[in-house]
């Protein structure tokens, strides 16, 4: 039997792209027509000259040939799509696998393999790219080849639900008769599909009359499609509520060899409390895992997938310019959107914009483009410090440390942000959650020693700015007093309004540092971001900048349910930078000290043993300084009035 394609059975742990992907096709003028081949009537000749078998040809396969095809299709969703799938267009239908759209980007094939080999996928794409269509095709494939499977399609309203059901029915009708599965009932069903093999396609949407928590808990299907999820009402409630039942459904699906998938598709819709945005931001981007140019997984893909700071989703982004769409199409879409700049940015150019109360204009947010890491080095607890450019040992750098005691997944983070002093450019970042002071202190110590041993920075060229809150005080003490004060010279000293100095950095609007400091910090941040958005590189910082809002009181902070920890760590550096510029203190030459140390063997050069405990350390220091006069204590950075409470309030229970 002659087949149109020979699709290899995929054996890669995540994805494999066969060598048969066509090069991106040149644009053409609506040549989507099909002509019966004049020589061989078993084929249709497509607009690009390629030929595919007619549906009638497949109808005439023998019983054994049909069985062979069924087995191939059941084993590979990709093979089924490229061989059999047709979708409706105005005035007719097109063959999905041979369409201009499909062949214009390898990401469509990658998605097919992701659906089969990973159970949590996010697809962000421009409008009219076929994101919902691909999800519906996967649902139809599963319903045909896996009897009694249940699929839920969660969308925005009843109109979209009915449209999905109608499209699914058309897709079924375009298949050869021997592959079609009949409906269980002849009655017209507009919001669900019930097949004779027991498979069901159910639709749902959240309205004012539906409790989102109950709706979420009712989603127990092994395949759930979240359509336009960035626009879904109560998305976070629904997503959280579905997790227990979804976990059970996934477990039994895998035990029985059935497909399981949680697929979220959408165009962007703001940021802030948007659940889809949050999921996407914390996912693993396919372009960090898969090398499209060389058609293989990157060597470190498992390390990325196991990153404790990432969720279980793999995300794929398809911009209109990656497909067969051209500038004429884009201009027409702009007209259709009435030249609404915000909608164009979101629906066509994939920009997650801030809310109406965002402190940054949409134009600035559009310029915040994440940069791939230049390199990284290993830290304790399975973390890595990401760097975005080569570190120059002759430049001055700031390492901002935003500190927080994290007691759960929704707690604040602790962040280390490395910033080049000469221009305020973001140079590196690590984001983590710790409930124990000494663990974050160890992480900070290792980062400092890594920058010292690997890149030649020293206490003259690296200033460590540690937030002096209740948690941060303990971190400050660990660097100043432990290990014989080895790292003390790195720690930034803040100055009281009275002129005395103290280790660490104060961030409040009032108190010992004078009034208005927090407001001045955010003023500096806004000036810098508005003036130099190209100097900001990390996803962590960019996503938090989008979420910054200004309250009616005038206070700037993260939107409800969001975080600003990376922003604050970066902000510490910008503020100190402004102070040093004002004082003329930026030009400091460093000296390379990295001999024989590499990112891979860094931890071999550093003592990673946890200290004997913060309690003992601080108790000893308290005993040492207990007899000093108040003015002597102030010179050491301890509080003259609150000695004992200060020493105790950063002793976190271990």
Image (cartoon, rainbow, N blue to C red):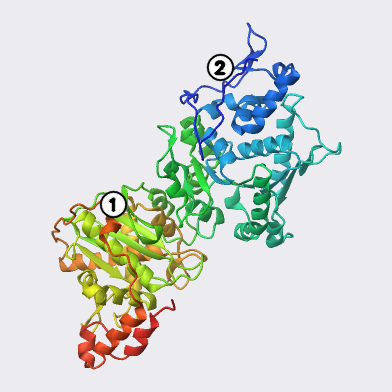
Please provide percent x and percent y for residue 68: 68, 24
Secondary structure beneath label 1: loop
In this view, 254 is above or below 59: below
Q: Is residue 420 visible?
A: no
Label 1 neighbourhood size at 10 Å, few (<14), some (14-19), many (20+)? some
> Could you tell whether 233 is left or right of 325 in the image?
right
Q: Earlier in the sequence, mark 2 or mark 1?
A: 2
Please provide percent x and percent y for residue 591: 14, 57
Please provide percent x and percent y for residue 434: 43, 68
Q: Is residue 115 visible?
A: yes
Number of numbered markers: 2
Whether residues under marks 2 and 1 lie with C-beta atoms below 8 angstroms apart, the answer is no
Identify the mark at residue 599; answer none if there is no mark: 1
> Could you tell whether 542 is left or right of 155 in the image?
left
Kindly identify which residue carries mark 2.
Answer: 50
Residue at left offset 42%, top offset 44%: 288
In this view, 259 is above or below 40: below
Looking at the picture, tell me which residue is in the foreground, 447 or 532: 447
Q: Quadrant of the N terminus?
A: top right
For marks 2 and 1, give the one nearer the viewer. 1
Secondary structure beneath label 2: loop
Residue at left offset 31%, top offset 91%: 641
Alpha carbon distance from label 2 to label 1: 50 Å
Residue at left offset 14%, top offset 61%: 588
Label 2 neighbourhood size at 10 Å, few (<14), some (14-19), many (20+)? few
Give residue 459's quadrant in the image: bottom left
> Could you tell whether 270 is left or right of 376 in the image?
right
Query: Residue furthest toward the right?
Result: 186
């Amino acid at each position: 039997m002659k087949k149109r394609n020979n699709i290899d059975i995929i054996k890669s742990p995540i994805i494999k792209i066969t060598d048969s992907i066509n090069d991106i096709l040149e644009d053409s003028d609506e040549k989507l027509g099909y002509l019966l081949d004049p020589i061989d009537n078993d084929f249709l000749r497509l607009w690009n000259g390629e030929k595919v078998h007619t549906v009638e040809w497949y109808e005439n396969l023998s019983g054994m040939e049909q069985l062979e095809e069924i087995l191939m299709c059941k084993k590979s969703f990709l093979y089924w799509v490229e061989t059999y799938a047709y979708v409706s267009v105005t005035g007719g239908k097109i063959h999905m696998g041979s369409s201009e759209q499909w062949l214009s980007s390898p990401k469509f094939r990658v998605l097919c393999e992701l659906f089969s080999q990973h159970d949590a996928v996010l697809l962000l794409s421009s409008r009219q790219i076929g994101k919902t269509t691909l999800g519906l095709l996967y649902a139809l494939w599963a319903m045909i080849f896996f009897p009694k499977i249940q699929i839920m399609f969660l969308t925005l309203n009843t109109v979209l639900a009915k449209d999905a059901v109608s499209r699914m029915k058309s897709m079924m009708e375009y298949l050869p008769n021997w592959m079609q599965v009949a409906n269980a009932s002849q009655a017209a069903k507009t919001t669900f599909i019930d097949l004779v093999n027991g498979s069901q396609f159910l639709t749902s949407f959240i309205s004012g009359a539906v409790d989102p928590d109950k709706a979420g808990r009712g989603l127990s299907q092994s395949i759930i499609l979240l359509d336009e999820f960035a626009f879904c009402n109560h998305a976070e409630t629904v997503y959280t509520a579905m997790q227990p039942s979804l976990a059970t459904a996934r477990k039994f699906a895998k035990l029985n060899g059935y497909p399981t998938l949680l697929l979220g598709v959408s165009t962007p819709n703001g940021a802030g409390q948007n659940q889809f945005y949050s999921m996407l931001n914390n996912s693993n981007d396919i372009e960090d895992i898969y090398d499209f140019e060389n058609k293989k997984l990157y060597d470190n893909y498992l390390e990325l997938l196991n990153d404790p700071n990432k969720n279980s989703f793999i995300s794929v982004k398809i911009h209109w310019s990656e497909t067969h769409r051209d500038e004429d199409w884009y201009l027409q879409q702009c007209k259709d959107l009435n030249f609404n700049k915000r909608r164009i940015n979101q629906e066509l150019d994939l920009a997650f914009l801030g809310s109406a109360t965002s402190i940054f204009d949409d134009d600035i947010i559009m310029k915040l483009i994440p940069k791939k890491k230049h390199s990284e080095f290993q830290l304790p607890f399975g973390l890595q410090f990401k760097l975005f450019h080569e570190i120059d040992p002759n430049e001055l750098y700031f390492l901002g440390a935003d500190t927080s005691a994290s007691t759960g997944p929704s707690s604040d983070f602790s962040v280390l942000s490395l910033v080049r002093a000469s221009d305020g450019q973001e140079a590196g970042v690590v984001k983590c959650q710790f409930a124990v002071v000494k663990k974050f202190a160890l992480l900070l110590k290792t980062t400092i020693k890594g920058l010292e041993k690997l890149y030649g920075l020293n206490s003259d060229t690296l200033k460590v700015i540690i937030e002096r809150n209740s948690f941060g005080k303990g971190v400050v003490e660990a660097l100043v007093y432990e290990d014989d004060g080895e790292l003390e010279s790195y720690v930034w000293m803040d100055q009281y309004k009275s002129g005395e100095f103290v280790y660490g950095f104060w961030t409040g609007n009032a108190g010992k540092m004078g009034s208005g400091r927090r407001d001045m910090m955010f003023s500096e941040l806004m000036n810098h971001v508005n003036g130099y958005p190209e100097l900001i590189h990390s996803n962590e910082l960019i996503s938090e900048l989008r979420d910054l809002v200004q309250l009616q009181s005038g206070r700037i902070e993260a939107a409800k349910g969001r975080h600003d920890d990376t922003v604050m760590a970066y902000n510490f550096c910008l503020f100190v930078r402004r102070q040093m510029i004002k004082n003329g203190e930026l030009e400091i030459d460093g000296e390379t000290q990295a001999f024989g140390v590499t990112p891979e063997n860094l931890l071999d050069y550093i003592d990673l043993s946890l200290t004997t405990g913060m309690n003992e350390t601080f108790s000893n220091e308290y005993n040492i300084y207990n007899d000093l006069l108040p003015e002597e204590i102030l010179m050491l950075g301890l509080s003259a009035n609150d000695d004992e409470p200060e020493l105790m309030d950063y002793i976190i229970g271990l």
